[in-house]
Amino acid sequence: MNMLIKVRKPLDLTESDVTDQAIYKERRKFIKNSASLAAMSLAPSFAMWPAIGAANINFENISKSEYSTNDELTPFDAITSYNNFYELGLDKGDPKRNAHHLKVKPWSVLVTGECEETGEFDLEDFISPAKLEERIYRLRCVEAWSMVIPWVGIELGPILKKFKPTSKAKYVEFKTILDPENLPGQKRNVLDWPYREGLRIDEAMHPLTILAVGLYGKKLPNQNGAPLRLVVPWKYGFKSIKSIVSINFLEEQPATSWNLAGPKEYGFYSNVNPEVDHPRWSQKRERRIGEFLKRETLPFNGYADQVASLYTGMDLKQNF
Ligand SMILES: Nc1nc2c(c(=O)[nH]1)N[C@H]1C(S)=C(S)[C@@H](COP(=O)(O)O)O[C@H]1N2
Ligand SMILES: [Mo]
């Protein structure tokens, strides 16, 4: 599946083969402009979670998964040094450089909203007794680059069920840690902090949706969203929210950070879709990190067989 033979023909290079750098600069320029008016407002100077015990997750006996792709893995160094994690800075190299500013111990997850078992859970309790799996997934950023990442994680669905969502739980909202004292990016209002994301409950329950706690067989590096991040492989990368501290079951569709920043550019669904261009660039092709020429972007990032049925009857140009 999706095995493309690499053909390197540098002489055939077109302008669009080499413009993806320009794209992420554009994305940043946009947020700078739209955020500048709000830039004077004060961010709260406290962290919103109390300290609970330290997490210790067992990384031995990680099982393989049928859901993994055979695509060639992106090297560890690229996955951990070319990042989007605006809390740790806007440039691709900033999250690694600033990784130590993210304090991951202790860590807990607050579960609220339309479920019977609300509460605050230490990370280890939150994911136990689940067994870790390796999931090799493609990650396709809205900026038109992609990677293949061997995540270590667990399916989100069985975890959510432990909290006994009520019949009113139609959506799940996730929030990233809010810690402007320590996180350099949160000292500036480039996004409305904390970073937040959401899924429809059936998307959250889909077996492809995981919570990752590691990659390449080891604990998640901070720059990749330690200690716990979402991975939704058929959606643009920004849906895969990092460093999660809260999960909220909701009846109504939650507001999401990128949708708030640019509602015409970043939809709630944000399924990877080569037929729906970003208003300022094409989504038809992508640059796989490490490769020179662009490759075709696949509907639902190549996971259409598994997930297209979630959207039966929906107009995906309208619900982008
Ligand atoms: N909290 C938070 N989560 C985030 C982001 C962010 O800036 N902050 N960036 C998103 C974007 S745009 C992408 S492409 C992926 C990148 O994940 P990676 O750095 O592990 O490849 O994380 C997503 N999750
Ligand atoms: Mo992204």
Image (cartoon, grey):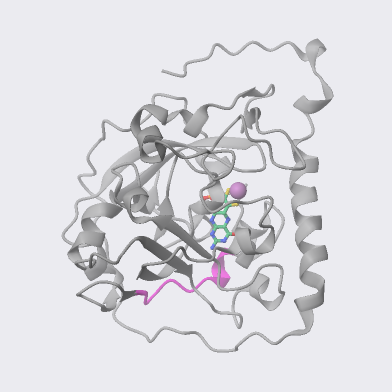
> Is residue 104 inside the magenta stretch?
yes
Front-lying residue, 210 or 256: 256
Q: Is residue 142 left or right of residue 311?
A: right
Instruction: Say which residue appears at 69% left-offset and 87% top-offset.
Output: 42
Residue 61 % position (x, y): 20, 45
Q: How many marks?
A: 0
Q: Quadrant of residue 188?
A: bottom right
Residue 235 % position (x, y): 49, 43
Q: From this view, report whether residue 227 is shown above or below residue 293.
A: below
Q: From this view, report whether residue 159 is shown above or below residue 64.
A: below
Name the quarter where the N terminus is drawn: top left
Name the quarter where the C terminus is drawn: top right
Instruction: Say which residue appears at 19% left-offset and 55% top-offset.
Output: 130
Instruction: Say which residue appears at 24% left-offset and 66% top-offset.
Output: 165
Q: From this view, report whether residue 228 is shown above or below residue 11.
A: below
Q: Is residue 52 left or right of residue 235?
A: left
Q: Is residue 225 left or right of residue 92?
A: left
> Is residue 182 inside the magenta stretch?
no
Outermost residue, front direction? 313
Residue 208 % position (x, y): 33, 41
Q: Quadrant of residue 29?
A: bottom right
Front-lying residue, 201 or 16: 201
Front-lying residue, 263 or 318: 318
Residue 189 % position (x, y): 71, 73
The range drawn in magenta is 99-110
Instruction: Say which residue appears at 64% left-offset and 74% top-offset.
Output: 186
Outermost residue, left direction? 129
